[in-house]
Image (tube, rainbow, N blue to C red):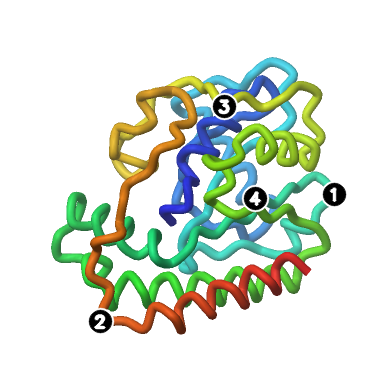
Amino acid sequence: MRANTSLIGHILGSHPQINGYYEQHIGYYSWRSLIRQKLIYCNQHSLKVKSMFMFDKVLHNEHFVSPVLLNSANSKVLISIRRPETTIPSVINLYKKVDPTHIFCTVEGATDYYVKRLHYLADICKKLDSYYYYDAEQLRDDTAMCLSKIADYLGLTTALSSEFKTQILTGVGNAGDHSGNLNAAKVKKETTDYSDFDLTSIDINSLTKIYDDTVRGIKI
């Protein structure tokens, strides 16, 4: 969560070979879950002619994803993590807007989510035969290279573009980012400055070590 996932979702969802761009908030238990995903998407969208992928992003541990499905020859897995010093404030700011009573509005709550999510990603990567990892920051800092490598991993026949289409669920409900940044319909290099955000209630050095260890383990 808050790792530029709505941005990459819209970039992928604007490609002619990919259907889907938003978060469905469902789990993936068996092949039936893949049918469910397609039915949910087709309730409001049409499948693209000659498309080859259905996209979803799964951001929360409570949504189970079967490693068996992810290890299918027809599955592709993208994993991305953002640094804690920007992720924690971003989570807090989001939930203060959408649900001010949520535990994620606190530094402690957002930090607990972040740590548990990193542990989950580290664990599931050990069960996967193949996946592609990229640092969330790379999508903005080195867009062309990041998108080129993702396109190669997915085996797309044409390049991914830093410009994308806004969709009928862009910024709507719980489908993804509500900030309005996606309305620019392109990758924006500038990001929110969280340098003055008060993180003194947590040990940011320990949190950074967890991040570094997780990313190092996933990249192996």
Q: Which residue is mark 4?
A: 32
* Separation of marks 4 and 1 at Cα, in angstroms: 17 Å
Label 3 or label 4, whichever lies nearer to me, is 3
* Quarter occupied by the C terminus: bottom right
Please state which amino acid type lies under the numbered disc 3: Ser
Residue density around tag 1, few if under 14, some if 14–19, many if 20 or more, within 10 Å: few
Please state which amino acid type lies under the numbered disc 4: Arg
Q: Secondary structure at mark 1?
A: loop
Q: What residue appears at the point 75 percent right and 40 percent down from the top-left corner?
A: 149
* Separation of marks 2 and 1 at Cα, in angstroms: 45 Å
Label 2 or label 1, whichever lies nearer to me, is 2
Please state which amino acid type lies under the numbered disc 1: Ala
Q: Earlier in the sequence, mark 3 or mark 2?
A: 3
* Separation of marks 4 and 2 at Cα, in angstroms: 44 Å
Q: What residue appears at the point 62 percent right and 77 percent down from the top-left corner?
A: 213
Q: Earlier in the sequence, mark 4 or mark 1?
A: 4
Residue lying farthest left? 100
* Separation of marks 1 and 3 at Cα, in angstroms: 28 Å
x and y, in percent, of residue 48 in the image: 64, 19
Q: Earlier in the sequence, mark 2 or mark 1?
A: 1
Residue lying farthest front? 195
Q: Which residue is mark 2?
A: 201
* Separation of marks 3 and 4 at Cα, in angstroms: 33 Å
* Separation of marks 3 and 2 at Cα, in angstroms: 37 Å
- Which label number is shown at residue 73? 1
- Which label number is shown at residue 57? none
* Quarter occupied by the N terminus: bottom left
24 horizontally vs 89: left or right: right
Confirm or deny contact between disc 2 and disc 1 (CB under 8 A): no
- Which label number is shown at residue 162? 3
